[in-house]
Image (cartoon, helix red, strand yellow):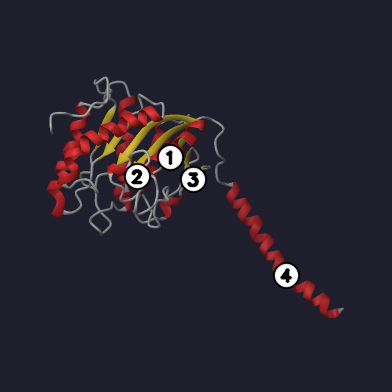
Amino acid sequence: MKTCFWRRLLADACILPSLALGVACAAEESDAPAASSKPYDLYLLIGQSNMAGRGKVDAESKRIHPRVFTLSKDGRWVPATDPLHFDKPGAGVGPGLTFGKAMADASPESVIGLIPCAVGGAAIALWAPGIQDPVTKAFPYDDMLKRARRACQDGALKGILWHQGEADRHPAALHLYAERLTELIARLRKDLNAPEAPFIAGELGYLDERNREATAQFNAVLRALERTVANYAVVSAEGLKDGGDRLHFDAESARALGARYAEALLRRRTPGGEKPNTPKKDSPDRSGK
């Protein structure tokens, strides 16, 4: 009997701290904002690794904005923190979170819903229906479309952010890039039933002197589409820095890029700011530029 008593006492002593920890965790979780019942302003984040983010996660990464949410891997709205993406184990700080916070601060009545769908290393040719990425085994376009349609049940698509091209700045792919991106933009707007959705592309960073000329040529292709694609803009990567690999933006630069994306979108909403482009349809630039 005495043995049973002491065993029971020891078991209780082990259980009680666990229960206390559970209560503390529950209290901590309850401090996070709940998913909004109000319709979200939705923003699609697509491209490759510099959209997904490879910056080092830090304390700033975990600071929650009460009106900025992200669609989790399993399709739930959760408070947005870095990393937003889950394409590869190295996902870290990208431009999306800073962008979302800036949009929320600019629209105090809005709740922001981010839809992270970038896939590191994915060339633009992989952003088409039915095409699988051989590295991650993901289907970038199909997976994105499923997630975006899920998100649109809870709000309206207000913009598409694109950062991609490190896999396409070589000559064999570059001459096809303007046509491929134009087709992708048109397909996205059609498939998501958002014909007027602003599409904001980001320049590649000038992070490696060995490919600086190729980067400049690629960015010129992005810029040329401002003349032919409706409601399209490009944000500069000038002055941004890498994290040591001469390929991926560090956390500070990724956040700066996010702020530039927000500025570009907000200019298109502000009277006297940039006006939507005049072309009536998304047609490739046939000039060869």
Which tag is nearer the camera, tag 1 or tag 2?
A: 1
Residue at image position (29%, 49%) is 253
Q: Which residue is mark 2?
A: 95
Q: CA distance from mark 1 to mark 4?
A: 45 Å
255 to 11, vertically: above or below: above
Residue 73 in view (yes/no): yes
Count the numbered circles shown.
4
Between the residue at mark 4 and the residue at mark 2, the CA separation in whole angstroms equals 47 Å
Front one among 40 and 225: 225
Marked residue nearer the N-terminal end (3 or 1): 3
Q: Quadrant of the N terminus?
A: bottom right
Q: Earlier in the sequence, mark 1 or mark 2?
A: 2
Among the two numbered marks 3 and 4 on one chain, the one whose residue lies closer to the N terminus: 4
Q: Amino acid at mark 3?
A: Ser
Q: Which residue position holds label 4?
A: 13
Q: Which residue is mark 1?
A: 115
Q: Amino acid at mark 2?
A: Pro
Pick whichever, 101 or 149, lies toward us: 149
Identify the mark nearer the N-term, 1 or 4.
4
| Location of residue 162 by image quarter | top left
Q: Is residue 86 left or right of residue 2?
A: left
**Residue furthest right in the image:** 1
Residue carrying label 3 = 72
> Circle 4 — which element?
helix
Q: The residue under label 1 is which amino acid type?
A: Ile
